[in-house]
Image (cartoon, rainbow, N blue to C red):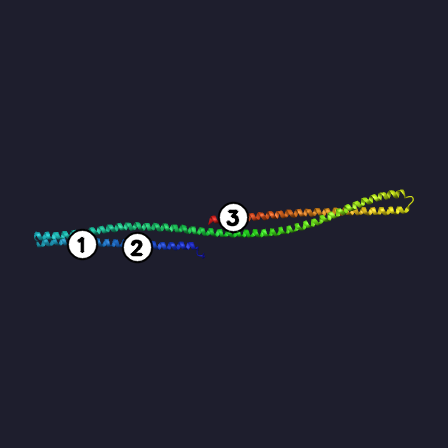
Amino acid sequence: PPPGGSSAVRVVATMTEIDAELDTELLLSLLSEVDEQIAVSRGCVHDASTKFEECKEFEAAAAERAREAQLSEATRKKLQRRAHTITTEVKGEFGRAVAQLRHAAHHYKHARAEIEKALRQRDRKVFEYSRSEGRAEAMSVAAEEAKEKIANSLQARSDAEVKARALQAELDKVTAAKDAAETHNKMLLATINDNEAAIRKQDEDIEALTGQTAEQRDALDSAASSQSSTMQQLKDARAAGDALTKQLANAKEVVARVTADNLMLLNKVQHTEAKMEQAVREREVLRVELNTNDNRWFEHLRDEL
């Protein structure tokens, strides 16, 4: 709509002007008819009054001439009959003029009633048009508010979609990190299993060497007095046993370190899974809020329209 007002307001104003012109034309036509009837009635009354005055003057002149001329009885009666005839005609004209005047008065009352009716209709139409104009303005304001609400809803939806995409990207990153952590965890578990197998093998070797060392110690103790070479072998066996013991300690330290790394990795995986579940819940909540807001805004807009 142009800045001067909405199209509905302009249409109502145009219809009001047209109805006002029509009512004015109707009133002018009725008033002109009443004026014509009144003018005709006044003319008839004036003519009747003139004739009545002429009749009176004629009667007075006839009576005067009769007195002056001392006319005969027949002539005087003839003049009286003529005066009576003229008087009767004048009375008839006067009666017709009065009837026309009454008719004009009745027509004037009818015209006045029509004029009052037309004025009431015009006032009612003006009131209806004013109320329609108010409704049109209210509907225009409601439409502007609905447009603003729709724009706000669309902006909220756009923001929610942007946030949902960001959460989805973060969820993808968390999923990728979880997959990488699971792969690394599997590799660590495989390494731990290999180390445990190696440690078990070393334990078996140590137990075997321990048994052999015990046997060798017994043999060396029994032959220590006579065989110096056997003492050297015993020293070598002891050194080998110490080396194996040191290797066992190192292997146990490696197992403990790997176990600690595995526990840290498991904690990190659990934290990552919890963060991913929270992101999924936030995305579902945003999606539900988005759908709910769409339905609520559009239902509200449909109710207002």
Q: Nearer the viewer, residue 48 or 62?
A: 48
Q: Disc 1 vs disc 2: Cβ atoms closer than 8 Å?
A: no
Question: Residue flagged by tag 2: what amino acid is it?
Answer: Ser
Q: Is residue 29 left or right of residue 177?
A: left
Q: Residues within 10 Å of mark 3 (few under 14, many from 20)?
A: few
Q: Residues within 10 Å of mark 2 (few under 14, many from 20)?
A: few
Question: Going 56% across and 49% down the picture, which residue do you hit?
Answer: 287
Q: Nearer the viewer, residue 101 or 65?
A: 101
Question: Going 51% across and 51% down the picture, which residue do you hit?
Answer: 150
Residue 272: x %, y % from top left? 65, 48
Front of the two marks 1 and 3: 3
Check the picture and name the quadrant holding the N terminus.
bottom left
Q: Is residue 187 left or right of residue 94?
A: right
Question: Residue flagged by tag 1: what amino acid is it?
Answer: Lys
Residue 138: x %, y % from top left? 44, 50
Helix, strand or loop at mark 2: helix
Q: Residues within 10 Å of mark 1 (few under 14, many from 20)?
A: many
Question: Going 81% across and 47% down the picture, which residue do you hit?
Answer: 244
Residue 242 against residue 13 in the figure, above or below: above
- Gap in angstroms between the C-alphas marked 1 and 2: 33 Å
Question: Residue flagged by tag 3: what amino acid is it?
Answer: Asn
- Gap in angstroms between the C-alphas marked 2 and 3: 60 Å
Q: Which residue is mark 1?
A: 51
In the image, farthest residue toward the right: 226
Q: Which residue is mark 3?
A: 295
Q: Which residue is mark 2?
A: 29
Q: Nearer the viewer, residue 127 or 80?
A: 127
Say whether disc 1 or disc 2 marks the residue closer to the N-terminus.
2
Helix, strand or loop at mark 1: helix
Helix, strand or loop at mark 3: helix
